[in-house]
């Protein structure tokens, strides 16, 4: 799954550490989500959507198979 | 993006250094007793070693930043384990009866239990991806140990010497570490 998390974060000029703190996860988790190596759980995805005031689909794009 | 920054020393760091010093001292005590040199020297060298590790961890925390309180809790459990192991070694040298020796042998199990509870609490406090890394590392550790033990048993039938069961713990630790490094690399 691809994500636009990096773009959303850059728009707000937040560092990975700041975003991680706001979401209550580690910076490593944010990095893995941004690079597409880890897909977050539904509760975490909802938390992100709530934080960026958008829908989950705005942040994450499913892989085309 | 590099977000790591050098930290100044506060109460948190001092508590960590004290805890690692105590753990180091307990390790030195066990080591000194086991290898029959001065216990005080063992405690002193162990504590100094602990201070060095605590200082290093406080100054530059590991890449995966666990809350230091969790690290200290594990150190506390490890200290308890080392002290019960020391108690076991000491009691075995005191000409105990067979029944008393069995009770003495059960002593380190209390330390093991504390260590397992500490590690369990640490894993429970991780975030979802860190927990996945740990779960995968434990799975690799478990599978690797099973292959190692099962494989060695077959070689033993073919004539290899019997080994101490303690090697299972060693194998488990090595395979867990390998699993952890592998999963950390995967999610880097």
Image: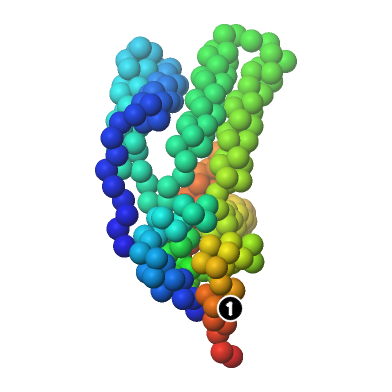
Q: Is residue B134 among the parts visible in the rendering? A: no
Residue positioned 57% across, 57% down in the render? B128
The residue sitting at the front extreme is A53
The residue sitting at the bottom extreme is A65
Query: Does residue B94 appear to the left or right of A33 in the view shown?
Result: right
Residue B152 percent across, percent down from the top left = 57, 54
Q: Give residue A43's quadrant in the image.
A: bottom right
Q: Nearer the viewer, residue A50 or B163?
A: A50
The residue sitting at the right extreme is B99
Residue B8 percent across, percent down from the top left = 28, 35
Q: Is mark 1 on a helix, strand or loop?
A: helix
Query: Does residue B16 appear to the left or right of B91 in the view shown?
Result: left
- Vertical comparison of B59 with B85: above or below: below
- Please name the residue that numbered disc 1 is placed on: A57
Q: Which of B159 and B119 is in front in this view?
A: B119
Residue positioned 27% across, 43% down in the render? B6
Circle 1 marks a residue in which chain? A
- Vertical comparison of A18 with B27: above or below: below
Residue positioned 35% across, 22% down in the render? B47
Query: Does residue B11 appear to the left or right of A37 in the view shown?
Result: left
């Amino acid at each position: 799954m691809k994500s636009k998390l990096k773009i959303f974060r850059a728009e707000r000029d937040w560092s990975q550490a700041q975003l991680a703190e706001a979401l209550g996860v580690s910076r490593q988790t944010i990095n893995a989500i941004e690079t597409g190596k880890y897909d977050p759980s539904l509760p975490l995805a909802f938390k992100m959507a709530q934080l960026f005031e958008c829908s989950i689909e705005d942040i994450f794009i499913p892989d085309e198979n | 993006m590099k977000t790591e920054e050098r930290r100044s020393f506060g109460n948190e760091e001092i508590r960590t250094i004290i805890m690692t010093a105590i753990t180091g001292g307990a390790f030195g005590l066990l080591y000194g007793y086991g290898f029959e040199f001065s216990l005080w020297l063992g405690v002193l060298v162990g504590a100094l070693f602990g201070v060095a590790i605590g200082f290093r961890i406080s100054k530059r925390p590991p890449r995966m930043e666990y809350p230091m309180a969790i690290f200290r809790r594990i150190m506390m459990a490890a200290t308890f384990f080392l002290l019960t192991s020391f108690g076991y070694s000491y009691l075995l040298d005191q000409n105990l009866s067979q029944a008393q020796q069995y009770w003495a042998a059960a002593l380190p199990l209390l330390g093991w239990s504390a260590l397992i509870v500490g590690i369990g609490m640490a894993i429970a406090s991780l975030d979802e991806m860190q927990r996945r890394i740990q779960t995968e590392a434990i799975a690799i550790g478990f599978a690797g140990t099973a292959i190692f033990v099962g494989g060695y048993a077959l070689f033993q039938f073919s004539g290899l010497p019997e080994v101490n069961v303690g090697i299972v713990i060693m194998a488990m630790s090595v395979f867990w570490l390998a699993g952890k490094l592998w999963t950390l690399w995967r999610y880097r």
